[in-house]
Amino acid sequence: MKKYKVGYTTGVYDMFHIGHLNILKRAKEQCEYLIVGVTTDKLVFYKNKKAIIPHDERMAIVESIKYVDQVVPQENMDKMAAWEKYKYDVMFVGSDWKGTDKWNEFERQFDKVGVDIVYFPYTQGTSSTKLRDVLDKIMKVDSVPAR
């Protein structure tokens, strides 16, 4: 029997990589039903970034993963509003957020409603930021006119 009934996690899932898969797999190992919020293009843009893969395609990618039971759009950063809508009993997040003011506050809020936060170790060696940096370098090389 799994420790939790309903789990929830979110992410942009742009340029899906092994770190994303690791979080989803580890989350599903701990809960019977896993809901995954995929950040909308509008919310990504609000964070001063632009997703390379459109939201509907990112939703389809995440939805096809066997560890995921339900995919929903993440339209804002309000985790309590998501809890009110989906009634999960655990939230899964990367350990890079542990100890931040934002997540310390989420811990206080979730404690009041009996929701655990489980922090998973960050996958070393890969990240969407690194992939984006490599793509940016490639695109700059490709755009330099030949002499």
Image (cartoon, rainbow, N blue to C red):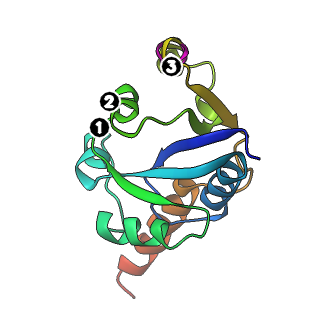
Disc marking residue 110: 3
Q: Is residue 74 left or right of residue 129?
A: left
Residue 67, given in percent of the width and then of the height, sits at 61, 63
Residue 35, given in percent of the width and then of the height, sits at 48, 51
Up the image or down, 142 lies above or below 123; here it is below
Q: Amino acid at mark 1?
A: Asn
Q: Amino acid at mark 3?
A: Phe
Earlier sequence position, callout 1 versus callout 2: 1
Q: Is residue 26 left or right of residue 84?
A: right
Residue 129, given in percent of the width and then of the height, sits at 52, 53
Q: CA distance from mark 1 to mark 2?
A: 9 Å
- What residue is rendered at 59% in x and 38% in y? 93
Which stretch is magenta?
Answer: 106-111
* Secondary structure beneath label 2: helix
Dots 1, 3 in contact, CB < 8 A: no
Disc marking residue 76: 1
Which residue is farthest front? 1
From the image, tell me which residue sits under label 2. Answer: 81
Q: Nearer the viewer, residue 63 or 124?
A: 63
Q: Which quarter of the figure has residue 53?
A: bottom left
* 110 drawn magenta: yes
